[in-house]
Amino acid sequence: MEYSIKRFFSIGLMTTCIVGFFSCTEKQNTLTNEEIANGWQLLFDGQTMNGWRDYNGTELTQPWHVVDGCIQAKGDGSDALGYIVTDKEYENFELAWDWKLSKGGNSGMIYHVVERPQFDVPYVTGPEYQLIDEPNFPEPLEDWQKLGVDYAMYLPDKSLMKVNPAGEWNSSKIVFDNGHVEHWLNGVKILEFEAWTDDWYNRKNSGKWAHAPEYGLAKEGVICLQDHGYPASFRNIKIKELPRKSKEVSLFNGKDLTGWENNGTELWYVENGELVCESGPDKKYGYLATREYFDDFDLTLDFRQEANGNSGVFIRSFIEEDVKVNGWQVEVAPQGFDTGGIYESYGRGWLVQIPDKKENILKPGEWNTMRILVKGDNVTTWLNGEQMVDITDGAIGKGKGRVALQIHDGGGIKVRWRNLSLKTL
């Protein structure tokens, strides 16, 4: 009798669980009317991999598939392979999802990921909300590798974390609002910090990312899921975009090089409240780049060329090895050499040069004012109030990166800069 009762109870419980599972499954990967009204969108339809593709690719070939209404990593990935990304880029957002790991599993949600051939893996550009089964992970973990961290940067409050074990569902959320970042786990905020502050840059430059110069700088990028060699499941992936807030930035404080990073051995210093670039003994290229990315902006600055004035202002550029900047240059050069024109530092060379009749707008040996307006795929430049070029280019439209000042190679170059004022758009 006792056996029969237990058996009946077990069968009834199993039936309840099965019914509950299917009724629960039917409600996944949908939005309520209220969510739709508030701007939420699904990143996964529950049935197909539409909207996802390989990192740095045009289609989906990585080991991911749909199983029981979930995006699932098969567990065939590695540190070098197994990343999928959204078709669309996102800037400011609330991003929520449910996740379930296998025993000892390791995965992650990465955002603001930049796609370029120079970047082999997404995590060298995009911050990561770490997902990992700590109790069963086969190797020792540093605190910065554990669940909920902003990977290798900021740690959550462990006392607030209530985690369901491997094989059960958890929910997470990332809020990124114009540099303000929050990590949530199962309805509780576990981590909060501000990106691009002095503290943020100190952490970036002193830890794991010290040799990843573009890590975390992009203000917009694709969202990435990671197959790190363990099966992992995701569902109810949804996002609500938040508005961009414009700001005015003084790029140069007139005192020191705060906010800038020197690349190369050429000379950059402050003299009489002016920023000076000068060729050093190596007579090579040198770049002084903002530590922050600026994508859409309106920039004005003054420059005065002393000696050979071959220089330039790079836009949406990033740093490569061997002191090379990859991006687009608004030319600053001696008269007759297209000041205000736009040159691509790789591939195509000159995109647009200025008409010969505009060469006399430059005032050699005197202060000149340059304005650079960058919005989407359009760049317009002015020199001393006169428009020099207006170009629309798809590659520029896809670019992300820093503003950088250049010293050309060959030696003998000296240029002074002041009043570098930028307004984000």
Image (cartoon, rainbow, N blue to C red):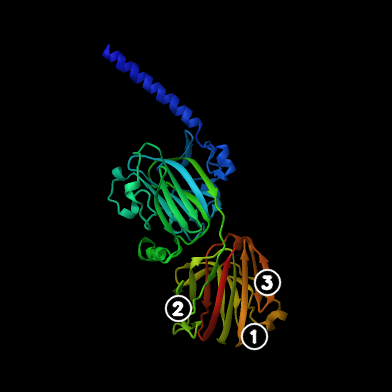
Give x and y (percent) for residue 57: 53, 51
Quadrant occupied by the N terminus = top left
Quadrant occupied by the C terminus = bottom right
Give x and y (percent) for residue 282: 44, 82
Q: Which residue shows up at 60% across the image and 81% down it?
A: 333
Seen from this angle, which residue lies furthest right? 357
Q: Which amino acid does label 2 sit on?
A: Asp
Specify whether residue 187 is in view: yes
Distance from the alpha carbon under mark 3 to that under mark 2: 32 Å
| Residue 35 versus residue 360 in the image, above or below | above
- Where residue 300 sits, quadrant-wise, is bottom right
Q: Mark 3 points at which residue?
A: 389
Local crowd at mark 1 within 10 Å, few (<14), some, or many (≥20)? some
Q: What residue type is labelled 1?
A: Lys
Q: Which residue shows up at 40% across the image and 54% down it?
A: 150
The mark that comes first in sequence, 1 or 2, is 2
Considering the numbered disc 2 on the image, is that residue within a helix, a strand or a loop? loop
Name the disc covering residue 256, or none.
Answer: 2
Q: What residue type is labelled 3?
A: Val
Q: Name the residue under label 1.
A: 363
- With 352 as the anchor, is 102 left or right in this view? left
The mark that comes first in sequence, 3 or 2, is 2
Q: Depth check: give the residue in front, 200 or 232.
A: 200
Considering the numbered disc 1 on the image, is that residue within a helix, a strand or a loop? loop
The mark that comes first in sequence, 1 or 3, is 1
Label 1 with label 2: CB-CB less than 8 Å: no
Label 3 with label 2: CB-CB less than 8 Å: no
Distance from the alpha carbon under mark 1 to that under mark 2: 27 Å
